[in-house]
Image (cartoon, grey):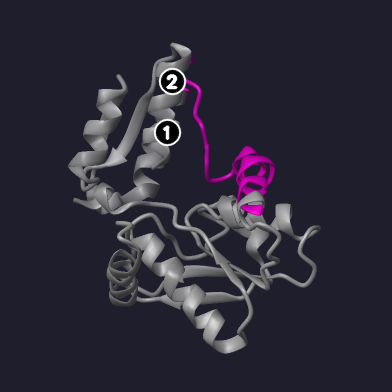
Amino acid sequence: NTAVGVAMAAREHGARALLFVPEDTSPGRISRMRAFGAGVVLTPASEGTAGARARAVQASKEDPALLYLDQHSSSLNPETHRRLTGPEIAAQLGGFAPDALVVSVGTGGTLLGLYAAFSGVFAGMEPTAVVPQGPPGIPGMRAIDPEAVPLHAGLAGMPVLEVEPEEAAWWTARVLEASRIPVGPSSGAAMAGAARVGERSGGLVLTLFPDHGFNYV
């Protein structure tokens, strides 16, 4: 998702985008990146996101014309969600105050930014991080690992819920059935976590769907 966004932004500003993505990335996503004029380098699927990231870092060291955009550690990641996503959601709430914030974790930037945006507005709102439970994992999501993803250090102390891929898929189907909105697996995981928190503590639970189903066709 970030790669597509970078490709769009690069085209808008007349810059060159060179994107390193695992070779098992969905063809639809890759086509979208190339449609915006980005160069796409496919890396071994066995290396996952970490391998793509390592190769991007190496490329930026070898070519001084390349600037590596590190979404895993840049403070601009959560800061953008604090300044933009948070206020946008607050306006959509129409005066309702959520009791809990439940967000699926990739880089962790969305959860960190939204919690920073809301903590001074909604007193007592509790954050929860949703992560995948074991292999094969859930696309777009990661277990909390501050060594591999520096932003994850900011999630220390937050409650964590683990969701299995099958549970995420079940909720993905339920969301489509109930709303006619096709969401992806990390959205299904977020919904699974929100449902658990709601069943346990009640109140108004706020979650966010970070992907749509067409990315995984």
Q: Which residues are magenta?
A: 61-90
Q: Residues within 10 Å of mark 1 (few under 14, many from 20)?
A: few
Q: What is the x, y in percent for residue 148?
A: 50, 53
Instruction: Tell me which residue sits at (59%, 44%) in the image.
Output: 73
The quadrant of the image that shows the N terminus is top left
Which residue is nearer to you in this view: 119 or 76?
Answer: 119
Tell me, for residue 5, which label it has, or none. Answer: 1
Which residue is nearer to you in this view: 158 or 210?
Answer: 210
In the rendered image, the vertical position of residue 38 relative to residue 135, given as above or below? above
* Mark 1, secondary structure of its residue: helix
Examine the rendering and report whether any part of residue 63 can be seen: no
Dots 1 and 2: beta carbons under 8 Å? no
Instruction: Tell me which residue sits at (35%, 30%) in the image.
Output: 19
Instruction: Tell me which residue sits at (25%, 45%) in the image.
Output: 25
The residue singled out by tag 2 in the image is 10
Residue 114 vs residue 25: left or right? right
In the rendered image, the vertical position of residue 107 relative to residue 159, given as above or below? above
Q: What is the x, y in percent for residue 162?
A: 45, 76
Q: What is the x, y in percent for residue 29?
A: 26, 39
Q: Quadrant of residue 120?
A: bottom right
Inspect the magenta stretch and tell me whether residue 39 lies in it. no
Q: Amino acid at mark 2?
A: Ala
In the rendered image, the vertical position of residue 110 relative to residue 99, given as above or below? above
Instruction: Tell me which residue sits at (51%, 52%) in the image.
Output: 107
* Mark 2, secondary structure of its residue: helix
Give the mark nearer the N terminus: 1 vs 2: 1
Q: Amino acid at mark 1?
A: Gly
Q: What is the x, y in percent for residue 144?
A: 52, 64
> How far apart are labels 1 and 2 at the CA level?
9 Å
